[in-house]
Amino acid sequence: MFEVRNVYRFDNDFKEITGFDHVGFDWSPCGHPPLDKFGRPHINMHIFRISPEERQTLTCDMLDPFICKFPPKTQSTIAGKKFFVIGSEAGSKRIVNAPENYTYQLDSALPGEGLHAFNNAAAAPVLDWFNPLLIMGLYDGQISFWESMFPAEFVSGEMVNSYSESVTYVSQTIVGLPFYWSMDYDPDSGFTTLTMEGNAEKCESKSTYLRS
């Protein structure tokens, strides 16, 4: 059984408004696949829509100590096969509730998280990677997490670093997915601030939430 670590739960009000349950911070000192994009030290900030208890059920037959075996037919359990069930548009390979042009690689399925999708074509080569990237987690046709992933250089050094992005999603059915996010690093304080803005899931009005 794998261990769900570094869990920081949101309060019930925030979960009800946004649909997000908790955040997990993971440090990848050597990077991870695909190494031509992410093979350098970076931080993974996963913001999960499922609980830590639910994450414990996201298990698979392992290829190595970290990655689920692929192709999907090599998985021996229903839970393992669900890593490769993708919610896509009818007649299209576009991933529902993910940004346009997001794709996935079979070697990116991790227990307790899901398959990782991102805009591979637009991602910079690993030596040029600096700005944070938005990664979407996929499991059993659903979105398991929303992730800001960023190299160590973005949150260190003596320069102020800022990044912002507006996001639209393919055939969006999850109301609370952020339509705007930004990340700012302040070298004087040493603080990094993530701001997410989106429509509230549980309010009758079209109000927005903001989290810093």
Image: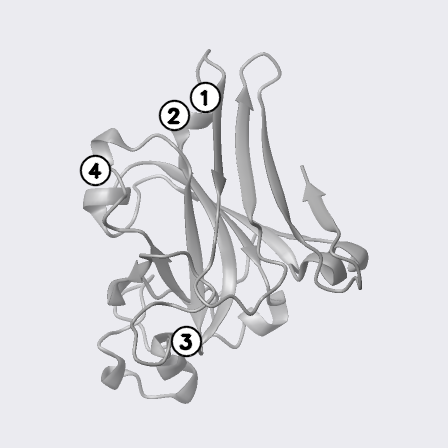
Mark closer to the chain start, 3 or 2: 3
Q: Secondary structure at mark 2?
A: helix
Q: Are marks 4 and 2 in contact (CB under 8 Å)?
A: no
Which residue is nearer to you in this view: 178 or 186? 178
Task: Compute the Cα span from label 4 to label 2.
Answer: 15 Å
Is the residue marked by circle 2 packed among few (<14), some (14-19), or many (20+) residues within 10 Å? Answer: few
Is the residue marked by circle 4 packed among few (<14), some (14-19), or many (20+) residues within 10 Å? Answer: some
Residue 153's label in the rendered image is: 2
Task: Compute the Cα span from label 4 to label 1.
Answer: 20 Å
Is the residue marked by circle 3 packed among few (<14), some (14-19), or many (20+) residues within 10 Å? Answer: some
| Figure quadrant of residue 129 | top left
- Residue placed at 19% from the left, 44% from the top? 36
Q: Are marks 3 and 2 in contact (CB under 8 Å)?
A: no
Q: Secondary structure at mark 1?
A: loop
Query: For the residues carrying marks 4 and 2, which lies nearer the camera in this image?
Result: 4
Mark closer to the chain start, 4 or 3: 3
- The C terminus - image quarter: top right
Query: For the residues carrying marks 4 and 1, which lies nearer the camera in this image?
Result: 4
Q: Position of residue 202 (x, y in %)?
A: 76, 65
Query: For the residues carrying marks 3 and 2, which lies nearer the camera in this image?
Result: 3
Which residue has dot 3 on it? 87
- Residue placed at 25% from the left, 38% from the top? 124
Residue 156's label in the rendered image is: 1
Q: Amino acid at mark 3?
A: Gly
Which residue is nearer to you in this view: 189 or 196? 196
Task: Compute the Cα span from label 4 to label 3.
Answer: 28 Å
Which residue has dot 4 on it? 125
| Figure quadrant of residue 89 | bottom left
Q: Position of residue 15 (x, y in %)?
A: 72, 59
Task: Compute the Cα span from label 3 to label 2.
Answer: 34 Å
